Amino acid sequence: MNPIETKDAIPHEEISHVVEHLFRHEAGKMVATLTGIFGPEHLTLAEDVVQEALARALQTWPYYGVPRNPSAWIMRASRNLALDVVRRQKIFRDKEPELARRIEGGNTAPDTGVPSEQEIADDTLRLMFVCCHPRIPPDMQVALALKTLCGFSVAEISRAFLTSEAAVAKRLTRAKQKILEAQIAFEIPSGEELARRLDGVLQSLYLLFNEGYKASSGEKLVREEVCDEAVRLAEVLAKHPAGNQPRTHALLALMLLNAARLPTRVDAEGNLLRLKDQDRTRWNQSAIARGMFHLAQSAAGGQLTEYHLQAAIAACHCAAKDYESTDWRQILSHYDRLVELDDSPVIALNRAVALAELQGPQAGIAAVTDIPNLQSLESYYLLYAVLGDFELRLHNAKAAAEHFRKSMQLAEIKSEQLFLSQRLAACEAQPRE
């Protein structure tokens, strides 16, 4: 009996959940495979047929049951829909025999109609390089990666960036237009082009992870599903010869070591928890072990990147059994090297925090005052949160309250606003001198 058509004993009410799971975890791989057949200029078509196949699953599975291999069913349905398009549309007519052969053939696993894992990984990587092409602006790259590689809907992307669905749709349309205009090939670049494009891919994955680790806006501080997808794509990249580079392993180590702390970044009510207040027994030890492994892999060669140093800082936190035993001297040393590579005021602010742990809050305030281009942080809520903390530790409640009040005005996440309001209340509760 064909395993694709065999019904499985999954309750009727779980069908929607199964399809949703497939959309989240398999759609990106299927889109990558079909983009490899049609070419990146027809990325929208690949997305459309996968979406239609998922819609048909919702319509038919309640009556005929869930297939034993749902992914294979969706992939076969997508291929059949793609063949219908090829036979109907004039733009494909000259290429119909070749496209039909590629759609129906390929390196598929026996009896499933699903491409092999290696073929899927290669196509995913090719699509990653397409999405992160330098001709596509960074904000469009992240939106395109979320949509095509991670299976996020336009509505989800709009919520992540606190913008309208229309704005996201326009961003995606422009990104695809860039692909068409630049005639971006569906390939993994080589030589010097690979080195240039790999940096763009890594930067896009870094931004993608950060958007999940600390959302820039919206209701939730943490979006674990975004972090998970960034890690998954980075692992695909690291396993391929084209991406198996020290800086790729460094970024993957950074992601895994930070992701290990995700379960404790907020409490049961979604309120922000500082590092010192987190329950370290709940940190994901498996993710920490994987992160340490990739950090070791990143040591090959002589290149030292920002990802290496940020991963090393994350490793120091993960290695400490409690907040008090944190090796702040080592962390400060990493920050000293990091500011040499990146003169970002945000990096300098983080360095000031580490310095204050070693030399006290007054030293931290002096370090903040000495940050070059400090005025660029005037609208950054963490600047005032950090200064408020320093002043509170110096028992300057009035000055601390002013900083926390300013920080609250600038914070956009509810959990951050609540945390800052609690810090402000602590200041106001102190006796007046």
Image (spheres, rainbow, N blue to C red):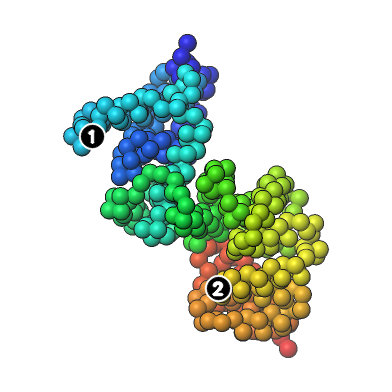
Residue 281 coordinates in the image, percent (x, y) = 76, 50
Q: Residue at x 72, y 67 (%)?
A: 331
Residue 334 coordinates in the image, percent (x, y) = 69, 68
Is 167 on the left or on the right of 18, as rendered? left
412 is higher (above) or lower (below) than 35: below
Q: Which residue is mark 1?
A: 92
Residue 386 coordinates in the image, percent (x, y) = 63, 74
Mark 1 crowd level (few <14, some 14–19, many ≥20, 10 Å Cα): some
Q: Residue at x 72, y 79 (%)?
A: 361
Q: Residue at x 67, y 73 (%)?
A: 336
Q: Quadrant of residue 302?
A: bottom right
Q: Nearer the viewer, residue 54 or 29?
A: 29
Q: Quadrant of residue 308?
A: bottom right
| Farthest-out residue, left | 90
Q: Residue at x 64, y 84 (%)?
A: 399
Instruction: Check residue 344 in the rendering and tell me which mark sits there, or answer none.
Output: 2
Secondary element under disc 1, as helix, strand or loop, is: helix
What amino acid is at disc 2?
Ser
Q: Nearer the viewer, residue 188 or 178?
A: 188
Secondary element under disc 2, as helix, strand or loop, is: loop
